[in-house]
Amino acid sequence: MCSARTSMLIVCLPCQPIILVLLDITPMLPVLDGVVMELQDCALPLLREVIPTDKVEVGFKDLDAAILVGSMPRKEGMERKDLLNANVAIFKTQGEALEKYAKKTVKVLVVGNPANTNCLIASKSAPSIPKENFSCLTRLDHNRARSQVAMRVGVPSDSVKNVIIWGNHSSTQYPDVHHAIVNHHGKEMSGFDAVNDESWLKGDFITTVQQRGAAVIKARKLSSAMSAAKAICDHMRDIWFGTPDGEWVSMGVYSTGNSYGVPNDLMYSFPVMIKNKTWKVVDGLSINDFSRGKMDATAAELVDERDTALTFLGA
Ligand code: LMR
């Protein structure tokens, strides 16, 4: 999911056919040609054109949707501060390019890590694009949580809905099943009742989801790819077409300080419902002390990341 290079997919909608513009750095253009060939070879009926480019003015021109997947990954021995510094530079440039070339209605999804803070920096660097148009990917964590519960209960993953990922796409994120509903062989049950193992739900379940990205990297020696791509498609499809009635999904979105006591001016993952390409935080869910502590801990990490990143942005 993370790479040192810059790449981006652009989807031209609202109609179903899409044009993909793939932006990468010049040395990667020969590799990009291979990606174009593979896309052509998929014979995707809705894919009308693929435009590979190393030019920002081509890559960002008149975009309806931008998926920012490239960021500087953490290398051995690298301090968190160094990682933020490098990424502030990348996402400031990309935000400025969106500001200059993209449509003001563009929907921007930030995937490159640290995704929440990168997304905040990109949005601050594109002041004429509404902050609500920016989101970062926690759908991968949402899907992981859904799947872990489904496997535990022995049902298909679509029998589990309304899990929540709160906060940062990092190991402080809080995967929460307090409001989840499981269709257990025809009977709707709460997540806790269906799983029937509170210590697992409050222990290994949470740490498994929090550390899944690192576990995939350890096993594959590469970051998640297929599951990340699936989550990106899920996220963008839901922005375009909305969430099913009665269901929410998790997305990192701009916090105005008005939901769940989360501080203002953070990209924080909340449960959201989407209609007409507009997301709304699902407010009013009850939060117990266990959840509160975890939601505050991940918020504190985001405040810290933001404050460090802003010192670089101002410099
Ligand atoms: C993931 O959750 O799989 C990735 O964000 C991990 C990473 O650092 O690339």
Image (cartoon, rainbow, N blue to C red):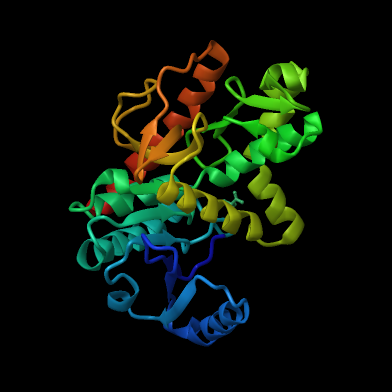
The C terminus lies in which quarter of the figure?
bottom left
Q: Residue at x 53, y 11 (%)?
A: 289
Residue 208 is left or right of residue 75, and the answer is right
Q: Position of residue 287 (x, y in %)?
A: 50, 15
Residue 315 is left or right of residue 242, and the answer is left
Which is nearer the eye, 308 or 6?
6
Say which quarter of the image contains residue 87.
Answer: bottom left
Q: Residue at x 72, y 36 (%)?
A: 148
Which is nearer the eye, 117 or 230?
230
User: Is residue 140 visible in this depiction of the protein?
Assistant: yes
Count numbered badges in the picture.
0
Q: Residue at x 67, y 62 (%)?
A: 222
User: Is residue 203 visible in this depiction of the protein?
Assistant: no
**Height in image: 85 above or below 269?**
below
Q: Residue at x 77, y 34 (%)?
A: 155
Farthest residue, direction right: 154
Q: Position of residue 16 (x, y in %)?
A: 44, 63
Residue 203 is left or right of residue 57, and the answer is right
The N terminus lies in which quarter of the figure?
bottom right
Q: Position of residue 5 (x, y in %)?
A: 48, 71
**Height in image: 162 above or below 112?**
above
Say which quarter of the image contains residue 284.
Answer: top left
Q: Position of residue 92 (x, y in %)?
A: 30, 59
Which is nearer the eye, 226 or 11?
11
